[in-house]
Every structure is written in C-alpha cells, then in structure tokens.
Image (cartoon, rainbow, N blue to C red):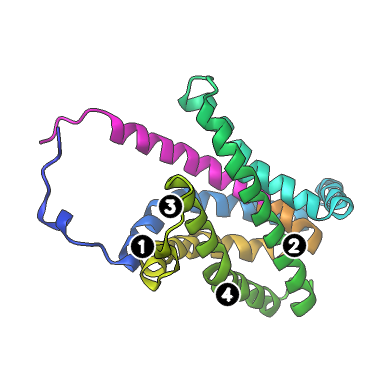
Amino acid sequence: MVRRLMPDDTLPIHPLRAGWVAARRSLVPGICIQIVMLGIVLLYFGNERARPFFEQIGTWKTESGYLFSFVSVAVAGGIFPEILRVLFFQKGRVERRNWSNLLFTIPFWGIQGLAVDLLYRSQAVWFGNNAHFWTIAKKVAVDQFLYNPLFAAPFGVTIYEWKNRGYQWSSEFLHWTWYRNRILPALVTTWAVWIPIVSIVYCLPSILQIPIFTLALTFWVTLFTLMSEMLVKKSSAPSSHV
C-alpha cells in the first residue's frame, strides 16, 4: 500500500532545513560521542597512570606514519560498519554485496584517513602544536569551514552517490544546485556534531590526533550504521497506511 501524500509532501525542503533536521536526528549520538571524547582528553591530562597507554599509541602512529592513518580509518569507516551489518542485520550471513561494499569503502575511507592526517600535520606547522585557545580555534576554523566545504563534504557525498548510481558519473555532480541540495545539508549535520569533536581532538598532541579521530569515527559509524539499517528495515516493512 502507498502512503497518501500530505500537503507538505509535495513541497521541496530547503537544504538548510534538511541539514538542520538531520542534525537534530544526530544530536543524541553526537553528544554521546562528544562526552566520550572529552572523557578521553580529561583522562590523558588528568591521570598519569594512563599516559603510557597514550604514549604507546603515539609510538605506533609515529613509526607507521601515513600507513597507520590509512589502515585505522579504513577499518573504522569501511570494515567495521560492514561487520556490524553482517552480524546484526544479516544474521551472520556474508553476502556478495558485503564484498562489493568493502571494495569501495576500504579505499574511500583510507584516502580520507590520509587526507585528515595531512590536514593535521599541516596545521601543526601553520599554527603550532599547543593546546592554547586561539591555536585550537584556528585549526577548527580551517578544518570545518575550509577543508570540509571545499573537499571532505563534496568528495564524500559525491563519491557515495556515484557508487549508489552504479558507478555512473553525472554532470549534475558539478553543478551548484548539487552542492546546495546535497552537500550543504551534509555540512550542517557535520558542523553540529563534529565541531565539538575536532575541538577536543586538537587539544591533544599531534601524534594522538589521528588515533583519537579514528576512535570518534568508529563510534560515529557504529551508531549510524545501526540507525541507518534500522531505518531501511523499517521503511521496507509492509505499511498499513493508505
């Protein structure tokens, strides 16, 4: 049965409103992640017994360099969500689509990890590696209002849409209306959730920023994999509405 359209269903939603709606839906998981990240920073600065653990992670990052960033972010953003999908929504059965998803998500998120690592390294050179208020403010501003609008959001949204369209490229992706209607809402959601998170990340030394970013991303994709799969399952269920 098809749900009867209400009057508002025929009207296009404004991109900023769409982004705000998505941000409100992300509010609770976003706040949960922010609290966890803040707890980690407080643990780092306030508990001397925890320092060796953080120092060991920093050593792994230093020794592995960009390889650490590629692998850790690929696991957090690509492999881990697929494992969740198989365990919780496919009853442990691995399907062909899981492998095809991994062929896309592993390189995609690995590249994102390299880009974020390069951003963090560059900002340490530009602004320093201290936890002063203005240093953090400058890094957050570049991260969220230059890097995200100019690269991360357009690249991520467009590449995922390209995948969802069967890897068919469209000239639509290069038009302003695409940015306004699809990327701008994603940016609003990103700003609402990630500005506090990256502010916390930039409080830490450079060698710990990618590991903590990866941890935040792991929580984020875990929550949104579960949420999105539940929504898909709910929307595919038979409806009694007409």
Q: Is residue 106 left or right of residue 238?
A: right
Q: Earlier in the sequence, mark 2 or mark 4?
A: 4
Labels 1 and 4: the sequence-earlier one: 1
For the residues marked 1 and 4, what is the alpha-carbon distance in whole angstroms? 20 Å
Q: Nearer the viewer, mark 2 or mark 3?
A: 3
Q: Which one is closest to the eye, mark 2 or mark 4? A: 4
Q: State the extent of the magenta-drawn residues as a range.
A: 214-242
Question: Residue under circle 4?
Answer: 146
Pick whichever of labels 1 and 3 is earlier in the sequence: 1
Rendered location of residue 235, percent (x, y)? 29, 36
Residue type at mark 4 is Leu
Q: Sequence order check: which comes first, mark 2 or mark 3?
A: 3
- Against 236, residue 192 (above or below) is below
Quarter of the image for the C terminus: give it: top left
Q: Quadrant of residue 24?
A: bottom left
Q: Residues under labels 2 and 1: Cα distance?
A: 30 Å
Please tell me which residue is depicted at 28% across the width and 67% down the height of the picture.
14
**Residue type of the residue flagged with mark 1:** Trp
Q: Is residue 222 magenta?
A: yes
Vertical relation: 221 (above or below) 41: above
Label the magenta part by its dominant secondary structure: helix
Residue 58 marker: none
Residue identifier under label 2: 204
Q: Tell me the residue at 47%/37% (across/down).
A: 226
- Three-letter residue code for mark 2: Leu
